[in-house]
Image: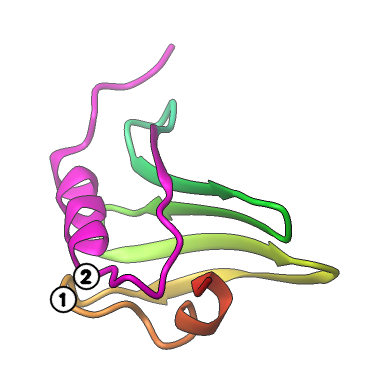
Amino acid sequence: MAKAPNPTSLQSAISFMSSLSNEFMMPEPMLHDSGRAGLFWGEDQLYADLEFLENGSIAYYIERGKDRHKGVVEFDKRNIPPVLKPLLTA
């Protein structure tokens, strides 16, 4: 059974979207069964799935071509984490 949307996670996803500039491809929003907000990219050479955790971190899995990256990174709710910038730019 899916949990209710988590307000902290939703706010983090909104802050992340607000910090995206034109150099970034726009993601699709989603809601995980856990109630956490997520963002998804599914382009020719990019597959990315971000999940916004309650503690302010972002869990990510990104494929660009044959490269694969995954991990958890802190998000200050103002700036795209540096590790994600080169992975998500157009």
Image quadrant containing the N terminus: top left
Q: Amino acid at mark 1?
A: Arg
Q: Residue furthest bottom?
A: 82
The answer to whether 16 is drawn above or below residue 40 in the figure is below
- The residue shown at (34%, 53%) is 52
Choose mark 2 or mark 1, whichever is in front. 2
Q: What residue did someone put label 2 on? A: 19
**Front position in the image: 71 or 87:** 87
Q: What residue did someone put label 1 on? A: 78
**Front position in the image: 90 or 86:** 90
- Is the C-beta separation of discs 2 and 1 under 8 Å? yes
Q: Residue furthest right?
A: 66
- The residue shown at (42%, 75%) is 73
**Helix, strand or loop for disc 2:** loop
Q: Judge whether residue 84 is colored magenta.
A: no
The picture places residue 26, in percent across and down from the top left corner, at: 40, 54
Lateral position of residue 69 relative to residue 21, left or right:
right
The stretch in magenta equals: 1-30
Mark 2 or mark 1: which comes first in sequence? 2
Label 2 Cα neighbours within 10 Å, binned few <14 / some 14-19 / many ≥20: few
- The residue shown at (42%, 69%) is 24
Picture quarter containing residue 33? top left
Q: Residue furthest top?
A: 1
